[in-house]
Amino acid sequence: MKKQILILMLSVLSAASFAQTSKSAKPINTQNSIAIQGYDPVAYFENGKATKGNKEFAATYEDAIYYFSTENNKVTFLKNPSQYVPQFGGYCAYGMSEGHEASIQPEAFTIVDNKLYLNNSLKVKELWVKDQASRIQKANENWYNKK
């Protein structure tokens, strides 16, 4: 009987271990767990510009903390977070199209098809915009095929 219990326990532990290692969670670009360097993800859509958030209006989504400039933006985000989080975990979209994770400058952004794309700098954004459709396709391939 003890042997059967031991085998059952080992089976359960093995299954739990497998489930954790097969999880395909993508990394999120944070500094001290703060996403988008503390900028408000909803403001990009609502105001069309990068707006610094306030830690007073903070929410956590997928292990990252997002700051908002208003309580209303926080509420809007919490209703549908996936609508507002930046693509590619908040890493530079141009960099991801080249196959690597790169830091961002929050003011260097575009919204395409209601999705937020961040870039490393305003110069990189210029390159991104020149061939945006192709870059989005390449970045998606790199991001979703990433191990």
Image: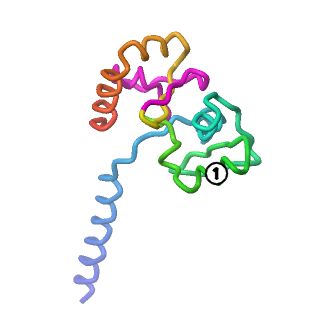
Secondary structure, mark 1, is strand
Residue 131 position within the rendered picture, expressed as x and y whole percent measured from the top left: 35, 15
Image quarter (top left, top right, bottom left or bottom right) of the N terminus: bottom left
Residue at (40% x, 12% y) in the render: 130
Residue 111 in the image: above or below residue 40: above
The amino acid pointed to by label 1 is Ala
Can residue 88 be seen from the camera position used here? no
Badge 1: residue crowd in 10 Å (few <14, some 14–19, many ≥20): some
Q: Residue 5 in magenta?
A: no
- Residue sitting nearer the eye, 141 or 116: 116
Residue 136 position within the rendered picture, expressed as x and y whole percent measured from the top left: 35, 27
- Residue sitting nearer the eye, 30 or 129: 129
Residue 135 position within the rendered picture, expressed as x and y whole percent measured from the top left: 34, 21
Question: For the view shown, which residue lies furthest in the bottom direction?
Answer: 1
Is 103 displayed left or right of 2 in the figure?
right
- Magenta residues, as a range? 90-112
Residue at (32% x, 32% y) in the render: 140
Quarter assignment of residue 145: top left
Image quarter (top left, top right, bottom left or bottom right) of the C terminus: top left
Can residue 137 be seen from the camera position used here? yes
Residue 47 in the image: above or below residue 16: above
Residue at (52% x, 24% y) in the render: 103
Residue 65 in the image: above or below residue 13: above
